[in-house]
Amino acid sequence: MEHDFSLETLLQHIGEETGFPYGAVTPPIVQSSLFTARSLRERNAQGGLNDAGYVYTRNGNPTVRLAEQKLAALEGTEDALCFGSGMAAIAAAILTFAESGAHVICVDTAYPPTRTLLQSWLTRYGVRTTFVSGECVEEFEQAIQPDTRIIYLESPSSLYFRLQDLRAVSALARARGIVTLCDNSWATPMFQNPHALGVDIVLHSASKYLGGHSDLLAGVVAGCREHIERVLKTRELLGGILDPFAGWLLLRGLRTLPVRMERAHKQGLQVAEWLASQPQIARVNHPGLPSHPQHKLARSQMRGYGSLFSFETHPITEDQAYAFTDRLHLFRFGCSWGGYESLMLGWAQTESDAAGKAPWLFRVYIGLENPDDLIRDLHGAIATLTP
Ligand SMILES: Cc1ncc(COP(=O)(O)O)c(C=O)c1O
């Protein structure tokens, strides 16, 4: 299919040019572990593959492949691979490009298990990681060592919503032969295409917006053909491919991604702006707000914003923090995001002072409820945060 269509059109049509069996509108779930050839002669002549190009679902599966084709089209990459979770995708990509003893540079606000993988687990293979705040390109430049193989980015990060200058960091890395990886789960390909800005490998937790219904764990690695072939070998050996049924759920979630993200952008900003205007709130961390220190950079590399953000209070007691969350009716308390349900998490930011008070950080996810109802819910609870 021609690639000059808009993302919304590519998403619905790519990979479906020949239609599905029986004229079905939805793709079949090819729930088969094995793909056989008509004859041993044919199989051996085709290097183990059957004439449809499949051998065994750990290597590839038609339902998963359709999701991969759509994701590559959305990210504007030559190819993409799906994994059983975001962490499976992140781990496979890092393991592919960081050989034993290599040096990695990672943003210090990356998803915590990604940092744990680098800073505790991979050290057993001699991998050393330098963590940087990622707020200026010079920091990356200073951290580069002769054996730096990977620069790991997550822009925006998912707690403090800090950005990295994807164009500048990837240009620096490319000039030094370093592979750049970027977790794009927050912005999704609807709002940010890191590959078009120069990043080599785009990563997703598809358990978030791409799936969109809180019923699926999945991950994505997208990049150029040469890189994806290398990651494919890792996936085959570590066995992290997405299950066909989960691939079908991901395809179903993707169908509505553009409409859900349009809503996420609009109502995330609406609630963030309302919170920013409340005297109980010290600061709102949302890259779409002009008060965000990197708002200009956000506008230069994103076309819109996810609806996950955080806000900070003035010093309050623990009782006040829990009284606030106890009064909320429309938010659930849980650590994932990207589904239809609004969520909140919160922590004290420092040790309590002599008066038993500390500033709190609340991470908010705005789901698909009506934003006016969510604001009313927050309005009914926010007085408890008065310092
Ligand atoms: C930004 C980000 N990246 C990666 C992951 C990991 O994805 P998964 O939970 O699908 O393994 C998460 C999960 O919370 C995340 O928030």
Image (cartoon, rainbow, N blue to C red):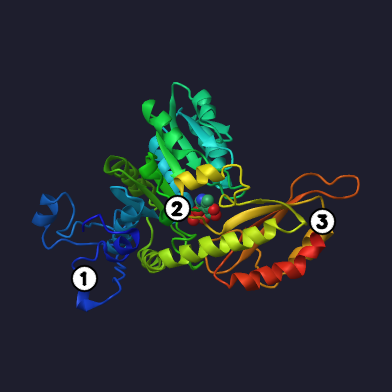
Q: For residue 303, which numbered disc appears in the image?
A: 2
Give whichever of discs 3 and 1 has the lower sequence position: 1
Of the pair 9 and 104, the residue shown nearer to us: 9
Instruction: Reply above or below: 311 against 371.
Output: above
Amino acid bearing label 1 = Gly
Give whichever of discs 2 and 3 has the lower sequence position: 2
Q: For residue 19, which numbered disc appears in the image?
A: 1
The residue most toward the top is 146
Q: Is residue 150 left or right of residue 72?
A: right
Q: Which residue has dot 3 on it? A: 318
The residue most toward the right is 354
Q: Secondary structure at mark 3?
A: helix
Q: Is residue 33 left or right of residue 221?
A: left
Mark 2 surroundings within 10 Å by alpha-carbon count, few (fewer than 14), some (14 through 19), many (20 or more) = some
Q: What whole-number distance in Å separates the C-alpha atoms at marks 2 and 3?
A: 38 Å
The residue mark sitting in front, 2 or 3, is 2
Image location (x, y in percent) of residue 102 = 45, 28
Some atom of ligand 1 lies within 8 Å of the CB belonging to the residue at label 1: no
Q: Is residue 211 visible?
A: yes
Image location (x, y in percent) of residue 145 = 48, 22
Q: Is residue 158 left or right of residue 190?
A: right
Q: Is residue 327 visible?
A: no
Amino acid bearing label 2 = Arg
Q: Quadrant of the N terminus?
A: bottom left
Image location (x, y in percent) of residue 23 = 21, 77
Q: How many marks?
A: 3
